[in-house]
Amino acid sequence: MSFTDYDYALFFAVIIVVLFIGFISFLWRKPKTMDDITEWGLGGRRFGTVVIWFLLGGDMYTAYTLIAVPGVAGGSGALAMFAITYGIMIYPIVYLMMPRLWTVSKNRNYITVGDFVKDRFSSPFLALLIAMTGVLAELPYLALQMVSIGYVMQAILLPVSISLIIAFLLVAAFTFLSGMRAPALTAILKDAIIWGVVLTIVIYVPIHYGGFGNIFATASSYTKTTKTFSPLDMPPSLALGYVTLALGSAMALFLYPHGITGTLGSKDVRTIKRNASLLPLYNVLLLIVAILGIAAVVANGAVFGTKGQAATSFAFPYLIKDLFPSTFTALAYAAIVVGSVVPASIMALASANLLTRNVYVEYINKNATSAQQARLSKFLVIVVIVAALIFSLTPAASGYVIYLQTFGGAFILQTLPAVYLALYTRKFSKYSIGVGWFVGLSSTLYILYLLNFSGSLYAPIDYMYVGIFGLILNIIAVLIMHGISLMLHKVKDEGIIENSELDSEF
Amino acid sequence: MNKVIKGILLLLPYIFMVLGFSIYNRVNPELGGLPFFYWYQLLWIFLAAGLTFTIYTLESREYDRKKVKA
């Protein structure tokens, strides 16, 4: 494919505009000072329904999503729909959990979930474990954003490493400067471009191929060439794997630091509850790109990732350049690239906040002022982004990044009792929750080891998702420990947060 | 709003997505060229959003009524 100079200019112009907005967003609702952890780290908790919709949407439906979902569809077919099944199951959890977490965080001025865990269990150490699980789960996710747009850069013959380094150092710089205002404001532009591009493609594609029926029928004819590809439905043997992966991913999403941090930036409970009904609209976008992955198989004339074919991650870029003039392709590729900017910014920011609040303030300098915390977090954003860059550019590591992200999901799931259970009861002690965390994490690791770290569905138990397997053992361990506490008459109200402090305003 | 009803409504998507898998994991009937597996889930995107929206609306009204009384 050949990009003209004009196409390259358009591609870079879109990216530069988005980065520029990131840099000037500190002017938006300008606070007295950015040297304040609530202002810098949470945008002052002032974002309303529309901004939060863009922020959380932009933060969760990422460049990786735009590459990976069509990629799975182009390589395995209907399996990609797990992303939609999972999307449907996210929001009832959000509705039940996030208003409570927001309410107590607002009143007690918490910045991270670790702050909540610390006071709920009176345990800085449990908070440290939960915070570090979050950071470790977040890093590969952040690296994955970089690897994803690397495919786009490769497709248009840009030098990948140097382009990634420049792009993400700029992201680090504007996050340093503008804090959470940067991902919030850039998300609006980024999503406008992505929705525009995806809707254009989905209108054109069925017209071009004579309807969705034709696309599925043609793609189905390739099932004979490869055993693992089935575009229409799932093989029944994968039923448990499919639903546990979807359920586990749904429960994990709002345990990730970027999900929680974005939510805590809301200005009130209504903002969160409204978004529990508005954010699902993004799942329509996801369903569209899954179908576009099937269309890419038709365009390619073969299933992706099979012998002699391009890697599955090229499915979406391939479809675009195959069907559209180079100018539109330039715009669409730029959309994928800017799709990584918002999540990268907020993921780095959320990780930095955890390190500052639950490691530095807790263990190094208890008397750090809000200004000192903000300055440290700003610096840590750069550290986190550089770490992710090293991760994604090391050939040995980058090949495994996609697996690491699945592991990340399984790991973060083990923090569920410390957060979601704790939002509804204060009867479990830090020991019960801590032992559960350890059992969940070590059993997850053990199964991953049995799988040679090359997948996350465990065949001997009907392809169950390892994260769910770990979570079940985790909860059993919590209950056994709790049973022992009951027998010893040690059960009491834990921590310093009253249950009534969690009841949201409505 | 009754907590049990709220709980059941919020549980519905999980029942239909997890336990209902063998029901929706099929190709026919198709709709607009989309296999059942796809359009059933497209429908559920809106149903699940509708459920949270209904609960939000009911809770919100109840809250406003209480506020007026107080």
Image (tube, rainbow, N blue to C red):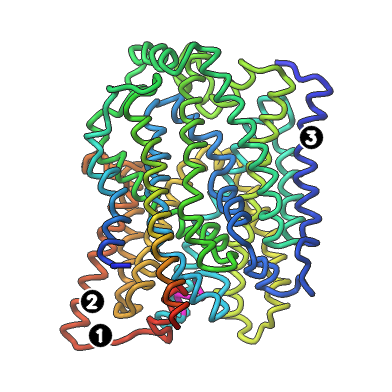
Which kind of residue does numbered mark 1 sit on? Val
What's the CA distance linking mark 2 and mark 1? 8 Å
Measure the C-alpha gap from mark 2 to mark 3.
57 Å
Q: In the rendering, which numbered label is found on residue A491?
A: 1
Report the residue at 58% width, 74% height from top: A357
Report the side of A8 relative to A153 (left or right).
right
Q: Secondary structure at mark 1?
A: loop
A116 magenta-colored: yes
Q: Nearer the viewer, mark 2 or mark 3?
A: 3
Amino acid type, label 3: Phe
Residue tagged by mark 2?
Answer: A482
What is the span of residues highlighted in magenta in the rendered image? A114-118
| Dominant secondary structure, magenta | helix
Q: Nearer the viewer, residue A401 or B32?
A: B32
Q: Amino acid at mark 2?
A: His
Q: Residue at x 49, y 74 (%)?
A: A103
Label 2 and label 3 in one chain: yes
